[in-house]
Image (spheres, rainbow, N blue to C red):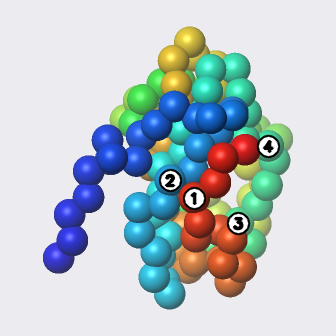
Amino acid sequence: MERFNLEDYTTVPEKSIAKRVIYSDQNTLAFVLNIAPGESLPDHTHFESTVLMNVINGTARLIVDEQSFNIQENDLIKIDGPETMSVHNTGSEYLVLYVTISPIPSDEKYAQNADF
């Protein structure tokens, strides 16, 4: 067993978005996305993977295949890999998302911390 605390991965982004990897193995990738107020995660897909995204803090507009949804703290969203998605922080506070992707994408860059 391993135990993690999401607060250890919640941070103020140096730029617009900070991704902090919690765990990764050959099957699963888990991380926290920290998105500054007014900033956005641009359109992208997750290929053959399924994404589960839990809103830990904040409010946002989630766009999936051109459909727009307002999301907020405690919402849990499942997105299938081929669906195009983007996230726009609509609140005045940092948006914190706990994300899992399975299976893990083959490109190792997805399993690394990032600031963008």
Q: Amino acid at mark 4?
A: Pro
Distance (Cα) linking label 4 and label 1: 17 Å
Q: Amino acid at mark 2?
A: Arg
Distance (Cα) linking label 2 and label 3: 18 Å
User: Badge 2 is on which residue?
Assistant: 20
Q: Is residue 88 above or below residue 77?
A: above
Q: Secondary structure at mark 1?
A: loop
Give the mark nearer the N terminus: 2 vs 1.
2
Q: Residue at x 51, y 18 (%)?
A: 93
User: Badge 1 is on which residue?
Assistant: 113
Q: Is residue 14 left or right of residue 72?
A: right
User: Badge 4 is on which residue?
Assistant: 42
User: Badge 3 is on which residue?
Assistant: 46
Residue 14 lies in what quarter of the image? Answer: top right
Distance (Cα) linking label 2 and label 4: 18 Å
Q: Is residue 36 above or below residue 22?
A: above
Give the mark nearer the N terminus: 1 vs 3.
3
* The N terminus sits in image quarter: bottom left
Residue 114 lies in what quarter of the image? Answer: bottom right
Q: Secondary structure at mark 4?
A: strand
Give the mark nearer the N terminus: 4 vs 1.
4
Q: Residue at x 71, y 27 (%)?
A: 39
Give the mark nearer the N terminus: 2 vs 3.
2
Q: Residue at x 81, y 47 (%)?
A: 43
Whether residue 53 can be seen here? no
The residue mark sitting in front, 2 or 3, is: 2
Distance (Cα) linking label 2 and label 1: 5 Å
Whether residue 11 can be seen here? yes
